[in-house]
Amino acid sequence: MTIPSKYDASQVEGKWYDYWMKNNYFHSTPDEREPYTIVIPPPNVTGVLHMGHMLNNTIQDVLIRRARLLGKNACWVPGTDHASIATEAKVVAKLKEQGISKSDLTREEFLQHAFDWKDEYGGKILEQLKKLGASCDWERTSFTMDPEMSESVIKVFVDLYNKGLIYRGFRMVNWDPEAKTTLSDEEVIHEERQGNLYYLEYKIEGSEDTLTIATTRPETIFGDTAICINPNDERFSHLKGKKAIVPLCNRVIPIIEDEYVDIEFGTGCLKVTPAHDENDKNLGDKHQLEVIDIFNDDASLNSFGLHYQGKDRFVVRKEISKELEEKGFLVKTEVHTNKVGTSERTKAVIEPRLSDQWFLKMKDLAKPAIDAVLGEDTAINLYPKKFENTYRHWMENVRDWNISRQLWWGQQIPAYFYGDGKEDFVVAENIENALILAQEKTHNSQLTIKDLKQDEDALDTWFSSWLWPMSVFDGIRNPENEEIKYYYPTNDLVTGPDILFFWVARMIVAGYEYKDEKPFQNVYLTGLVRDKQRRKMSKSLGNSPDALKLIEDYGADGVRVGLLLSSAAGNDLMFEEDLCQQGKGFANKIWNAFRLIKGWEVDASLPQPETSEIGLVWYEAKFQKTLAEIEDHFSKYRLSDALMAIYKLINDDFSSWLLEIVKPAYQQPIDKKTFDAIIEVLENNLKVLHPFMPFLSEEIWQYIADRTPEEALIISKYPILKDSDAKIIENFEFATGVISGIRTIRKDKNISFKDAVELFVIDNDNNSKEFDTVIKKLTNTSIIKIVTEKVEGASFRVKSNEYFVPISNENIDVEAEVKKLEAELKRAEGFLFGISKKLSNERFVANAPAQVITIERKKEADTVAKIETIKSSLKALK
């Protein structure tokens, strides 16, 4: 086979991915081997490959490929999440472009459009992952709204409801007016924003008195149902029992007293709007106040907003403040900074809203999940451990989970209403079962399916994905099936810390509730990918490179190496494209080393040189030492460090040292024993490299020899860890110091490599001589001789050993050496002039600290000595 002169990733990657797929290497079925299982954090069906996915999935692929090489039954389950809010928004927007409104469609018609959209765009990200080299078991690809997945979700809802853990409540929720759905507290991002504090004057009924309140939201006055004062605030004691008149709408509302009011904040008077603030709702419940909801579901004002009806809340805020000012109700306005809740998905400002919603009681469910991560007998390990504090804070302060969403895209809540009352419903897995329950509950056997109406709401996306490690193996519907028993619990979960609570913690909760077992053993939390300015990469900032373009430019292996070399465990990754160039350069270095080896002519009759023998013994020791380091790094999820150890082993120890040691003389053959050993060394290098650079390693592996599909690198056996000889590694390190010293002298003295030099050593260290033949070969040294006194010539030290290389005019380029020394002399004399001038300055000498003067005088003395040495060398040459 002709080996190409350059490694071309574009010609290699598709070829080997197709080969791996054709031979079904990624597919797993239960057998007698130890399972190693990873479930993918399912990317949103709306997603395209970005840098976070690249990092996360590269790490998963490294772990799964390594497990495969270790002889485990490696199973990586891929899939996508239906992402209810994001996907419904995309489908609604697409329909709008076609002139279709969601409200014009039935639920079934809308869902058909949504599934059509999913079929067209949904699997794109999984296809893109193949470009990265992701070795997922594609036959197992799951989607969170596959029929069997949805069936599992509904089954769990019914079970939790029957256990009394799911309830329906009229509560203040986070309302996203753009997506027109509720959000859980965890889906709300709180941002500091600058706004205004409006001071409004309310008249007191039946008198000329007034009171002033401060509010950030003047548009909500239409929902005011009381003014609250602190009973201990003497400033307002004259208002007790009286009533106030709401500006503009002239509604009369009571003045109530409650110690909840902060005397120090604002004016000390608080307007109470129970429908639009959670604290106000609590006050309203306590004092039995009327609740007036002034907003439509898109946050425009309804009929309670009078002449502002139909206008957006932020438009009204501007207009009403102007009207209040004109009519004398606005006392003043101040600039005010406060925290505003925004939707994680749509970025819309959240509106607190009272609504009938479904909730899951979390307090008791969370207990086993807290013990699993933070208990004495830790069942689940978080890497890095620093995230345990975050986990503790969330889980110990967990609130009931609002699991309903006012959407159609998602699993429809299996609650069926048979009457007009809020409690007139039953919960069942299907409408047939619901009818039986409704007939029993009402004692009315005449009820029919037509009398039942299913709740319109869908379940929160996370209520589907929290079952992921179980539902992908059908562990909810068929809890004793062979696959769930074999693959569960899974081994490693790789994800971002931003969904530690949303997803990770909830999966742990579900695992203990439905399998009485952890869902995974280790959670590796990657850092976020940021740009050089430490900004999170995002489409909106335009600072995220095109992931597929990077693969096109640098090859998948180059991008994988670039990402991992800069990604220390759990720390954010400052991404620079240069890192991918470094990865591509590493691939080229390995390719060139391989081509060098394959270019050697082999002569079976030649004996093995001593240099090759000792070099190979040393490299085996170094390889084993590095292998032990790699194992340690993997055990601590320090994948960046593991890759760096491999990088140094191949780049430095193998390419720069071993190949130089065994390389035959120019146009000379190599002995077969050494050649075969080097091929074995190369193959072991490729095995440890394969998880990180799968394409390059498989390409070289297949070039080394004709291989059957059973002999492919992807399923070969990982090197076995053995004890390493620390002494030989130490001795070689010493030898490399000697080699570097001789090479430096050759370079400094312009001594051609073809001219042999002699080496004399005062051997204070009593150093091993086993690498003397290597030193001679790599430096063209004719003899290495131990002496007791200094020898004339150039010298250097390695530890306490002193080395001397005699210099004669015969083996150096005199003209070049003279030129170099004259330039050095000129520089030294210029430096000396500057120091002397400084030291002759009386003001400097008088004012500078004694330590500074001492340093300057030493510099002067050293420079004088250096000048004398250079002059002496010049004199000898001339």
Image (spheres, rainbow, N blue to C red):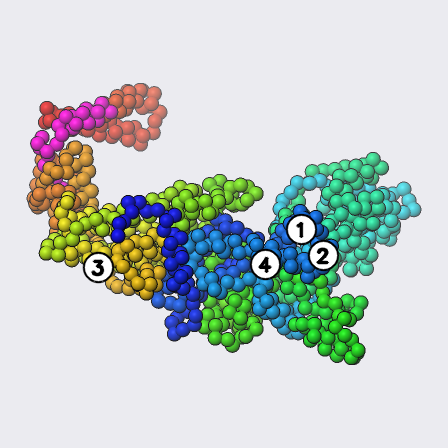
> Circle 1 sits on which residue?
95
Kindly indicate whether the residue at mark 4 contacts the one at mark 2 (C-beta within 8 angstroms): no
SS class, disc 4:
loop
Residue 82: numbered disc: 4
Q: Nearer the viewer, residue 760 or 778?
A: 778
Of tags 3 and 4, which is closer to the observer? 4
> Circle 2 sits on which residue?
105
For the point 82% across and 42% down, the residue is 201
Position in image of residue 356 (x %, y %) = 73, 62
* Amino acid under disc 2: Leu
> Circle 3 sits on which residue?
725
| Residue 338 found in image quarter | top right
- Nearer the N terminus, badge 4 or badge 1? 4
Q: How far apart are marks 4 and 1 (CA)?
A: 18 Å
Q: Nearer the viewer, residue 372 or 526?
A: 526
Q: Give the extent of the magenta segment.
A: 803-827
- Nearer the N terminus, badge 1 or badge 3? 1
The question of residue 811 being in magenta is answered with: yes
Of tags 1 and 3, which is closer to the observer? 1
Position in image of residue 501 (x %, y %) = 56, 59
Q: Can residue 247 be seen in this view?
A: no
* Amino acid under disc 3: Asp
- Nearer the N terminus, badge 2 or badge 4? 4
| Residue 6 found in image quarter | top left
SS class, disc 3:
loop
Q: How far apart are marks 3 and 2 (CA)?
A: 75 Å
